[in-house]
Amino acid sequence: MAATERRAYSTADLEQRVTEIEIRPMSEADVEPGLELVMKVFAEFVAPDLRPAGVASFAKWADPTAFAERLRGGHRALAAVHGGRIVGVVEWMPPAHVAMLFVDAAMQGEGVGQRLFEAGLRQIRATRQDVKTVGVHASRYAVPFYRRLGFRALAPEQEQDGIRYTPMLLVLEE
Ligand SMILES: CC(C)(COP(=O)(O)OP(=O)(O)OC[C@H]1O[C@@H](n2cnc3c(N)ncnc32)[C@H](O)[C@@H]1OP(=O)(O)O)[C@@H](O)C(=O)NCCC(=O)NCCS
């Protein structure tokens, strides 16, 4: 009984936290704190699976100047914000490829990654009705997450510039 009460309490608490999360397009001021979060989460969950060359090539990809340049070139980025702090970032490459998706370790497993993904996809589909599939190069850690969203692996894990990833595809419903 006590355990049930505890679970009921923590579910309500979790729901409140999740509804308090705002998903918004990343502003210029969000770039630095957003990429700091990306690098922190990358170091903890992705870098341990990579060779030093992979860590270095990701650091170049997550460099603020390179990131801002990509946004000017048509990439989209959204941030998840909780209590004024960025707790998640998604970057989309046109037409519909997830270029990065990172959620603060303390907020993982609470639906933030899925909300970031769905918000970005909604924006893309609002302007591009011809988009029928979504691609991602999934880190080893994120493969189960993408499977849960309906993605399928197109090939076994591979390596490019020291980055290990599984190419995955989601076929969108009409
Ligand atoms: C991958 C990542 C973005 C997922 O974000 P998240 O906020 O933790 O995921 P969500 O809470 O939105 O999960 C959505 C669903 O996927 C499931 N899921 C998430 N991670 C999972 C995992 N490692 N194994 C199994 N299922 C998982 C959740 O349980 C949830 O399913 P449910 O609705 O049945 O409960 C996050 O864990 C992360 O930042 N990982 C480290 C960085 C990384 O690898 N990024 C991807 C680069 S391609």
Image: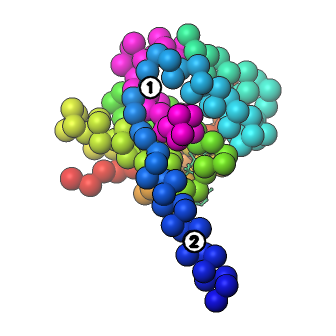
Q: Residue furthest bottom?
A: 1
Is residue 54 shown above or below 4? above
Give the extent of the magenta segment. Answer: 66-93
Residue identified by numbered label 2? 9
The verdict on residue 86 being magenta is yes
Residue 150: % across, % down:
43, 57
Residue at (67, 46) in percent of width and height: 105
Residue 26 marker: 1
Residue under the image location 43 percent in, 32 percent down: 78
Please, what secondary structure does the residue beneath circle 2 have?
helix
Mark 1 crowdedness (10 Å alpha carbons): few <14, some 14-19, many ≥20? some
Q: CA distance from mark 2 to mark 1?
A: 33 Å
> Label 2 amino acid?
Tyr
Viewer-nearest of labels 2 and 1? Answer: 2
Is there any visible trace of residue 163 in the rendered image? no
Q: Residue at x 57, y 34 (%)?
A: 85
Left or right of 142? Residue 21 is left
Q: Nearer the viewer, residue 130 or 18?
A: 18
Residue 84 position, x and y percent, is 53, 34
* Mark count: 2
* Residue 118 visible somewhere in the drawing: yes
